[in-house]
Image: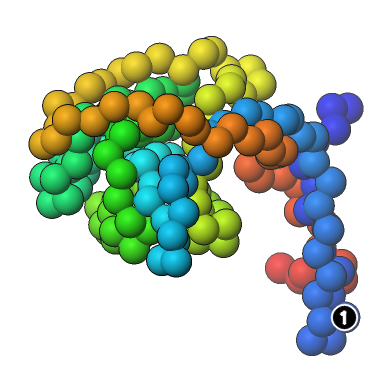
Amino acid sequence: MKLPKRINLLLKFRNVTFFAMISATQTLEGVTSKVSEDNHGGKHIILLDLEPKVNPSLEKVIDALRKVQLAYSLGDFWLTSDAEGSYRAWCFSTRPWTTYLRIMLDLIDYGVLDYNFFFWSIKRGEATLRTSNKHGRPPQQVVAYLKGCEETSIPQKLTRVLYDTGLEKRGLVLRFPFKRA
């Protein structure tokens, strides 16, 4: 018998629920979006994790990126991928945090931004995009290049980070007491 790589445990007693998760994890390396600090959230390069839930095609992602590129006068986008329907967009235009948030909200409206990426970006006040390979996946490859509206260059210094993430996004769910059918 093969054990699952992730188990979610839910214990419910009246109106209180205890949640615990056991998961195989991996440590990944990435870079953060913040390139300068100020009193309003700083300046950020545009890093995006794009995973469309409906019709996860490269064309849908490119169409959404072109819309925000034109709307916000952004520079070139490099789009990388290591799995079908999973993309990362890199743009080295710098924008204030509030503008970056509007870009991400527009991409949520277009149905292409990964919501967990958005959630953790808000929680941390900066985005993190991985540069290392995920377990069991090939290296990231550039799959598209979108010429932009302004000249940009890669910042002299990007903040590198290490973070842990689960190998599986979903797993076996154990509920106590058991739900009746």
Which residue: 41% across, 66% down? 40
- Rendered-image quadrant of the N terminus: top right
For image coordinates 66% across by 45% down, the residue present is 170
Left or right side of 116 for 171: right
Q: Is residue 36 above or below residue 133?
A: below
Q: Is residue 46 left or right of residue 106?
A: right
Amino acid type at image mark 1 = Phe
Residue 126 drawn at (x, y percent):
50, 52
User: 78 or 1, which lies in front?
Assistant: 78
Q: Which residue does the numbered mark 1 point to in the structure image?
A: 13
Location of residue 12 with respect to 33 vertically, above or below = below
Rendered image coloring scheme: rainbow
Say what secondary structure mark 1 lies in. strand
List x then y, in percent, for residue 3. 85, 33
Residue extending farthest bottom? 15
Residue 169: which quarter of the image? top right
Q: Residue at x 33, y 56 (%)?
A: 96
Residue 168 in sight from this viewpoint: no
Q: Residues within 10 Å of mark 1 (few under 14, many from 20)?
A: few
At x 72% / y 30%, what residue is drawn? Answer: 27
| Image x and y of residue 141, in percent | 40, 14
Vertical relation: 24 (above or below) 18: above
Camera-side residue of 117 and 29 = 29
Residue 170, above or below 167: below
Q: Can see residue 18?
A: yes
